[in-house]
Image (spheres, helix red, strand yellow):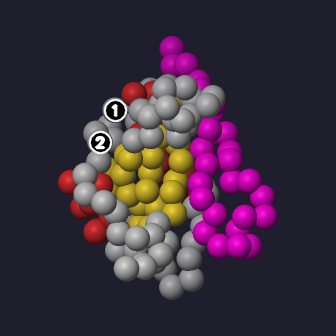
Amino acid sequence: MESKIALKIDRDSACMGDDVESHERIRVCCSTDTLEKVIRDVLNSNFLAKIVGGKATWIIQNGSPKNIVPLGVIAQQWVVPRFLVDANRPITDFIDDPDSGGLFFKYWVQQDPDEVFECLQLGKPLPDRYGRK
């Protein structure tokens, strides 16, 4: 029998008007749900802000305060996310404690998602979030 978990998800605000309320939510899912399925469900729920112009980059990371790990990149202009880990593994493999950790979506503004993904993949510094040199 599959056990249910209450998974905390949260995200950065995408603009000043977007930070009026907390974005933290609880999603109930099965402990056997894969990371890919959980992310697909989050995307289908319209949890992430849509940006005018159609370009937004989000870094998926575990929300563990002890050990933050990037898991993948979502781009508004991509059809599917790209993962840095095996997204077919259960969500519980990536979350230390669903009550305090969960998933966090870090807004990387309109930076090139291919470059962001490559930097994360190679362990290189990320491009400046706001395009400053």
**Residue 50: image location, x then y, percent:** 57, 72
Q: Which mark is residue 132?
A: none
Q: CA distance from mark 1 to mark 2?
A: 9 Å
Q: Specify the segment rendered in magenta.
A: 1-29
**Residue 71: image location, x then y, percent:** 37, 46
Mark yes or no: residue 121 visible: no
Q: Amino acid at mark 2?
A: Val
Q: Is residue 109 found left or right of 121 in the rendered image?
A: right
What residue is drawn where x is 39% and y is 41%?
69
Q: Amino acid at mark 1?
A: Arg
Callout 2 crowding tier (Cα within 10 Å): few <14, some 14–19, many ≥20: some
> Residue tagged by mark 1?
89
- Classify 116 as above or below 105: below
Image quarter of the C terminus: bottom left
Q: Is residue 73 found left or right of 38 in the rendered image?
A: left
Label 2: state its secondary structure.
loop
Callout 1 crowding tier (Cα within 10 Å): few <14, some 14–19, many ≥20: some
> Residue tagged by mark 2?
85
- Residue 79 magenta: no
Q: Is residue 20 found left or right of 80 in the rendered image?
A: right
What residue is drawn where x is 29% and y is 48%?
84
